[in-house]
Image (tube, rainbow, N blue to C red):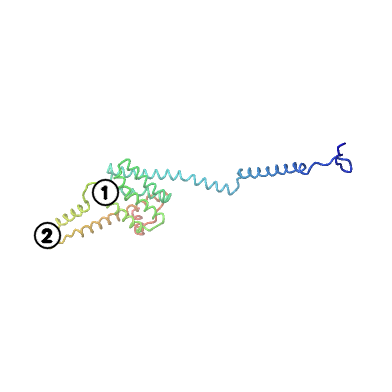
Amino acid sequence: MSSPPEDRDPHGNPPPESTSSQSNLPRSAADLARLEKELEEVEASLSYTRNDSDSSSTATAYVRTATPPLMMVETAFLASTASLLWLVSYYLSIGPWMRILFPIPIALVYLRWGLRAAWMSAIVCGLLLSVLMGPYLSLLFFIPYGILGVQLGAMWRRRVPWLASISVGTLISTLGFFTRVALLSVFLGEDLWSYLTNRITDLIQWALSKLVAWGLLGLEVLGQTNLTTIQIATVGVVLVSDFVYLFTVHLAAWLLLERLGNPIPDPPHWVQVLMDEEK
């Protein structure tokens, strides 16, 4: 038997291929186009197009990365300056006037760079002095002069009046005095505060006895010396001394920092009048 004739269309052409075979090429082209589109999107996401907002953010980032080195250099320089002042004053004993300058470099760091840089400067001073002079002397500098520099810089930057900043600084300086007495008491194994007040009491008692011997006072004053009163009077003398010291620090900073471009608040009017008369 002969094979059945192939199915042909009315024109005698062979039958077309199956639908699945006809749709292979268009589907492959669609997939290729889709892949090319995804590739373009990925390349666009990875590429960088600079616009105005990017330039402004880049400029801001540049400023932020350019200022920390300057801050670090100034902080280290002023910290070493404060440490050198303390070192020279302790070993060479040039004069007590150098004590006025101890907190000013750290206060200048605060005026220029803020709180964090000021604390960094104070801590660097303590670490540097601990290497050069030992931990005891470095602690005597940090309390009160390191803390005092931070406090003065903070209040000067906020334009606080002189009386308020001097009063707070007086308390910090008095704290430094008693810290020094406490440390010396620990190292010597003796209560230096009691020893100091007892010696002051003995001195007052001796002076009163001389006045009684000369007939200027009566005998009843010899038994009225009270140790508690002497201690309170000693604290008062320390407070007055520190108040005067802080006033001189403010005066020196007012004259010096204005020339450096970081002025502190103006002094009271009577101080300006006195300074104008001196000029």
Please, what is the three-letter code of the amino acid marked with disc 2? Val
Q: Which of marks 2 and 1 is in front?
A: 1
Mark 1 neighbour density, 10 Å: few (under 14) some (14–19) many (20 or more): some
Q: Residue 183 carries which label?
A: 1
Mark 2 neighbour density, 10 Å: few (under 14) some (14–19) many (20 or more): some
Q: What element carries label 1?
A: helix
Task: Identify which residue is drawn at 87% across, 43% down.
Answer: 9
Direction right: furthest residue: 11
The quadrant in which residue 83 appears is top left
Which of 224 and 183 lies nearest the eye of the viewer?
183
Q: Is residue 26 left or right of residue 211?
A: right
Q: Residue 212 carries which label?
A: 2
Real-space Cα distance between discs 2 and 1? 39 Å
Q: Position of residue 194 (x, y in %)?
A: 20, 54
Which of 160 and 279 lies nearest the eye of the viewer?
160
Which of 44 and 176 lies nearest the eye of the viewer?
44
The quadrant in which residue 158 appears is bottom left
Earlier-in-chain disc, 2 versus 1: 1
